[in-house]
């Protein structure tokens, strides 16, 4: 194998490593999503506090209780509401 071929192999391997690092960073970002409170959900999604409470009570949206405070992950709420409003739970 000549020097150009070796260099191409090294460059290819570096590209693969870079892609793997980027994917790991993206996965870490998803896991480290910040929690938001009811007020932030209301503002972002244009919902009333009462609507958020009803969704929570019906177990439509996931929530976390941390130190007595109800918190949410915005992406989970958006995904759950999309699923709910696309007809999957119309019988409730």
Image (cartoon, helix red, strand yellow):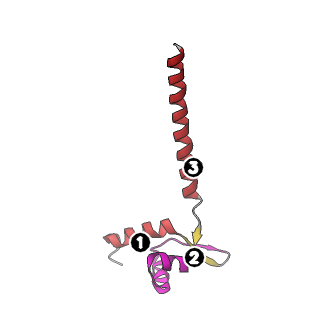
Give the mark toward the camera: 1 or 2: 2
How many C-alpha atoms fall within 10 Å of the one at disc 2: few (<14), some, or many (≥20)?
some
Locate residue 75, reporting x and y percent: 49, 65
Locate residue 79, reporting x and y percent: 43, 66
Question: Which residue is depicted at the point 55% across and 36% down?
Answer: 17
Question: Which residue is depicted at the point 45% across and 83% down?
Answer: 51
Q: Earlier in the sequence, mark 1 or mark 3?
A: 3
Residue 36 found in image quarter: bottom right
Q: Which mark is residue 37?
A: 2
Real-space CA distance between mark 1 and mark 3, rounded to the nearest whole angstrom: 27 Å
Q: Which residues are magenta?
A: 38-66
How many C-alpha atoms fall within 10 Å of the one at disc 1: few (<14), some, or many (≥20)?
some
Q: Secondary structure at mark 3?
A: helix
Question: Which residue is depicted at the point 50% across and 82% down?
Answer: 53
Left or right position of 82 against 35? left
Asked whether the residues under the numbered discs 1 and 3 touch, taking CB atoms below 8 Å apart as contact, a structural biologist would say no
Left or right position of 50 against 66? left
The stretch drawn in magenta includes residue 73: no
- Residue designated by label 1: 81
The stretch drawn in magenta includes residue 46: yes
Real-space CA distance between mark 2 and mark 3, rounded to the nearest whole angstrom: 25 Å
Q: Residue furthest right?
A: 67
28 in relation to 57, above or below:
above
25 in relation to 79, above or below:
above
């Amino acid at each position: 194998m000549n020097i150009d071929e070796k260099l191409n192999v090294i460059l290819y391997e570096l590209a693969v490593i870079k892609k793997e690092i980027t994917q790991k960073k993206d996965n870490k970002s998803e896991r480290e999503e910040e929690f938001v409170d009811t007020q932030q959900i209301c503002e972002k999604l244009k919902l009333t506090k009462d609507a958020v409470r009803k969704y929570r009570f019906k177990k439509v949206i996931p929530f976390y209780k941390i130190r007595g405070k109800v918190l949410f992950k915005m992406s989970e709420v958006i995904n759950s509401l999309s699923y709910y409003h696309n007809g999957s739970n119309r019988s409730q």
